[in-house]
Image (cartoon, rainbow, N blue to C red):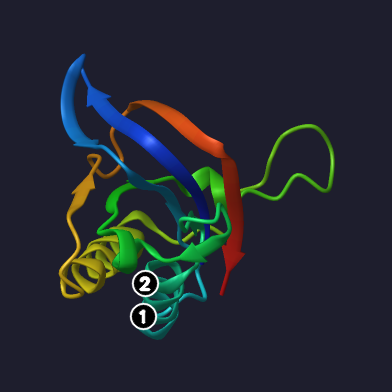
Amino acid sequence: MKVVVQRVSRADVKVDAKVVGEISNGMLVLFGVSKKDTAQDADYLAEKISQLRMFEDAAGKMNLSAVDVKGEFLVVSQFTLCGNCEKGRRPSFDDAALPEKAEELYEYFVEQLKKKGLKVETGVFAAKMDVSLVNDGPVTFIIEK
């Protein structure tokens, strides 16, 4: 499982030119599931990113988590995170989970964040989406489990 987490001042996702998810201060999370991933991996990542100190305190230091600042989350499924670009010029997606498993773990991950009392918006699984964001900082992390 791999996530790209970006601290944002705003983000939204559109499907067919219609906004389906939108947040202000918080995190845009691009979420990829591989064949070997489990619910325990999703639990780990939900805990990790909700507590990750990537928001600034009064002194300008990254000492606050999304929980601390009541940050919002926009979680967007992105199977291309599981692409392997080591050989040739065309990415291989052999390690990406099948859509049924990926959707199940995606929805599970979203629920784990919601259980923490966080506002969570989403894209539409497997849809063609347009994602817009203002990366605050910029601050971006790649986290794998």
Residue 143 picture quarter: bottom right
Residue 12 picture quarter: top left
Say which residue appears at 19% left-offset and 36% top-offset: 21
Say which residue appears at 59% left-offset and 68% top-offset: 144
Looking at the image, do the residues carrying marks 2 and 1 touch, with CB atoms under 8 Å apart?
yes
Where residue 64 appears, as percent x and y from the top left, is 44, 65
User: Badge 1 local density, few (<14 within 10 Å), some, or many (20+)?
Assistant: some
User: Badge 2 local density, few (<14 within 10 Å), some, or many (20+)?
Assistant: many
The residue most toward the top is: 17
Look at mark 2 in the image and give the residue it sits on: 46
The residue most toward the right is: 87
Left/right placement of residue 15 relative to residue 29 reads left
Left/right placement of residue 83 relative to residue 59 reads right
Where residue 84 appears, as percent x and y from the top left, is 70, 50
The secondary structure type at the circle numbered 1 is helix
- Give above or below for 96 relative to 90: below
Look at mark 1 in the image and give the residue it sits on: 43
Taking depth in this image into account, of 130 and 22 the one nearest to the observer is: 22
Q: How many marks?
A: 2
Alpha carbon distance from label 2 to label 1: 5 Å
Where residue 51 appears, as percent x and y from the top left, is 41, 73
